[in-house]
Amino acid sequence: MVSFIRFKSRLVFIGALLILSLLIDQQLKADENKTLPDYVIKQFGKPPAIPKGALSKDLQKAVKVAFIDSIENSVWEEEQTAALDKIANSKDPRLAWLIADLLRFINGRHLNNELAAIAAKLLTIPSPTSNHWGIITDQLIAWDIPAPPNYLEAKRAIFTSVVPGWDNIFVEGSVDWRHVSWGGVLIDDRKYNKTDKNCNCIPAADNPEVSSAKDAKWLKDSDIIFGIGINGSYRAYPRRIMEVREMVNDTLGGRDLAIPYCTLCGAAQAYYTDRLPKGIKRPVLRTSGLLIRSNKVMYDIHTHSVFDTFRGDAVTGPLADKNLKLKQASVVTTTWGDWKKEHPETTVLVEKLALGRDFDFRNTRDASGPIFPVGNVDPRLPVHEDIIGVLTASGKPIAFQRSKAFTALQKGKKIGFENVQLKLDAGGIRAVDANGSDLGSHQAFWFAWSQFHPKTKLWNE
């Protein structure tokens, strides 16, 4: 009888453990899903189970054969097919990142379809029938799938086999290499002040020639410009030129500047590149030809240090080792007519810098949304809604919906958050503090600002 009671007690105890284990397992799954916002689950579904730890030796060899040897030796034979089969049956979604990287450079339709099908199998999603690279990459970013072990080594082999100029770019740092992709152009690696030389790249401009407002008869009053004012000096950077150049290294009001324009993000920014810590040479920034979540990746040609284009901090290389973060000056997005009326003494870049081109990517190529993978997008505003973004004194990012803020300011309303106050400037908007000092604001698309500042505050009228 005693034995029976003990046996029964053990059954109850074991049953309790099973129930507890089940509850813990359910909670763990719930916690995993909680890390993703509801809108991500709604759009992309729930992610598959993710293994942890190193790859088996067989899988490591398969990765080398399929993703490194195939690119370095420009071959795809039975050995690569066999390696790909092992990867397909691994049930490891992390390996889909390498497939996505390979997809970016593969043109053959049959291999494209095969790679996409394998990536979809690993991710447990339907195989895409078109835009294979974009759909797979969006899914990976949205689910925040971890990278496989030794990811950078394999990715570097893939990318540098295509563009040798990236050898010094793909190095360890605080950049999330999962999100870095090719923008379809080559690196601008020309030396400083040699930008009169042609290049098969997006050509930066160093120390650009300027004219007075009076002599800029080629500009219409309705043309969009990016206006910068420093120490009483004002300069207009026409969007038509910035669409072509995407990067200008300039001097204005006695200060050195680097001015990147990301056409994909609708964002022109201005970074001070002088008055830096002792021992740091002025960074000269160039377009690398790479993107990170549809935002241009810029780098310094002296040190090959990569900078976060949206935030201004060095994320790889010697300048990252020195924790360099560039301070921003405000950029006002407005029309040429409004800018020159408010600042008649302004200078403006000369027409020849547009190289005879007249793009309007915002209203053509990018009109339907981001053309490169961005993953999930904060749904509080439409992806291409214009915002004015700035960081507060406490370091909080704050975004102001431009259309609402502009209307409110025109009505005389005060708009602010913490130390930030908005003011109208030549038909545009800039952020200042209580003393009227510039806070380094700029205009951008909502999708870009919110993904580089994922915890951003959003001003409500």
Image (spheres, rainbow, N blue to C red):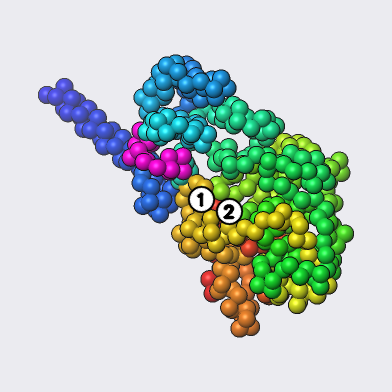
The magenta-colored residue range is 120-135
Image position of 56 with respect to 217: above or below: above
Q: How many marks?
A: 2
Foreground of the two, 46 or 154: 154
Mark 1 residue type: Ile
In the rendered structure, the answer to whether residue 232 lies left or right of residue 69 reads right
* Whether residue 42 is visible: yes
Q: Residue at x 37, y 36 (%)?
A: 120
In the rendered structure, the answer to whether residue 233 lies left or right of residue 108 reads right
Image quadrant where residue 15 sits: top left
Q: Residue at x 60, y 60 (%)?
A: 360
Position of residue 135 measured from the top left corner of the image (x, y, whole percent): 43, 43
Q: Residue at x 51, y 36 (%)?
A: 104
Q: Which mark is residue 264?
A: 2
Mark 2 residue type: Leu
Image quadrant where residue 399 sits: bottom right
In the rendered structure, the answer to whether residue 215 lies left or right of residue 166 reads right
Position of residue 139 measured from the top left corner of the image (x, y, whole percent): 43, 43
Foreground of the two, 326 or 163: 163
Residue where numbered disc 1 is placed: 371
Name, please, the residue furthest toward the front: 356
Q: Residue at x 75, y 65 (%)?
A: 236
* Whether residue 322 is visible: no
